[in-house]
Amino acid sequence: MLVDDQPAYPMSCFFKITLQGQFDVALFTSALEETLPNHPLLASSVTETKGKYYWHNMHGQRTGIMPVIARQSLDAERQYPTAKGIDLFREPAMKVTICNENTDPAEVSITGQTDIIFETHHSASDAAGTARFIEDILCNYAQKTGVANIHGANIQRAPVNPDLLARRSNPWQRRRIIELLFGCFRAWKFLMNRILPLTPKKTSDLQKLPAEYPAILCRNLTEAETQNVQQKAKQLGITINDLFLCSAFLAMKKWQEQHAADKREGHLRIAVPVNLRTPADEQMPAANIVSMTFLDRKVEKIQATQEFYQGVHKEIQHIKRYNLGWSFIRSLTIYRRVVGNFRKMMHPDRCWATATVTNLGRLFDDVPLPKREGRVQINDSLELIGVTGSPPVRSSTAIGISVLTYADYMTISIHYDSAILTRCEAQSILDDAI
């Protein structure tokens, strides 16, 4: 992910929490400072020595570089503020932006709706790691406002252990032969299948960040829409995750049929992040512990039929049963040993995936804070009313779709390449994917 980071396509993940009520910027900054030492990658930069990369300020230190905390208002036309990406060789792996109508730096107590955006370099953390970091901040903030004394609640989170970062799982450890064989077959398909981009149009400048980066649209499903999704998945005999993967395939096919100038043969491919955490990683700080698996479907085979839905469901179950999330990591390990580095693999014109689709699951359910109708009550005057998140996009991968559930309501986000898609086109794909 560090090598794949391009000026026009930063390897940044975005997470936004929306708060309602009275928010104290100074207390939040203090809570952030106290939380960072337990999540050292987020406050670290990277150095390169003899072609190898090292995290700076990790070993023997509990504090790194403080992330930049910016304040600005949020444009009514945008759901996320503009960003510039993260240069890990010059700055820490996280940036934080506080968006409120009141941007006066002298005003530390602000009211109304406050959006806090966490931009994280994907090398440093995945969505699960960033969510854990945010939970710790919210608990620290609540403790500073005396919520434990008010509600008599124990708001101490289970501690994290930064030393665990040094011994993240070995991709070759305790792997069965059948897992390795299935992994080799999937690696062969990954290399041999011809993958079609959403559109053959390419950006003209890979060195220039689009002015509207990140281009992210979010849709909060109503209670009725959330129930409809759950009921449809149940009727089809598949999971909600399977349903969204199928919906993404169908939405991409529809868009191509309506917009692609030439009808080319090949596969549409969805990259699916796989969380590699085990119970032994429960105390792991924010980090990237994710791999990828890939679902390929010939365009003509993508149909809203029982056979198509069941095919995706069975493949996902097969991946889980044989731990095939590790296949991509093992393949990259072999590639680096044979070729020497990843740079030859990262050709910007090659389409490795048509889209990325990730399901972050239920968020903030286990935060030890009071809840009202499923929403976290940080204190008596501040409530967490919404959460959205988004994966990065590559130069040949036009969209990244993210699904999450908070307070029993689903939210779907699409991060799109604004050099390829217009806002209206991205909105159309998002609507079709629901």
Image (cartoon, grey):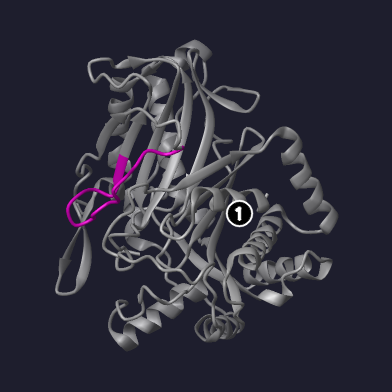
Question: Of the residues shown, which amino acid type is indicated by label 1?
Answer: Ile
* Residue 101 drawn in magenta: no
The answer to which quarter of the image holds residue 204 is bottom left
Q: Is residue 149 above or below residue 170?
A: above
Q: Is residue 90 above or below residue 38?
A: below
Side of 12 where 225 appears, left or right? right
Residue 396 in picture, x, y percent from top left: 44, 68
Q: Residue beneath label 1, please?
A: 429
Residue at the spot 27% in from the left edge and 51% down from the top edge: 86
Predominant SS of the magenta segment: loop
The answer to which quarter of the image holds residue 34 is top left
Q: Quadrant of the N terminus?
A: bottom left
Q: Is residue 227 above or below residue 52?
A: above
Residue at the spot 31% in from the left edge and 29% down from the top edge: 72
Q: Is residue 111 visible?
A: yes
Residue 7 in picture, x, y percent from top left: 28, 60
Span of residues in magenta: 79-95
Residue 340 in picture, x, y percent from top left: 28, 84
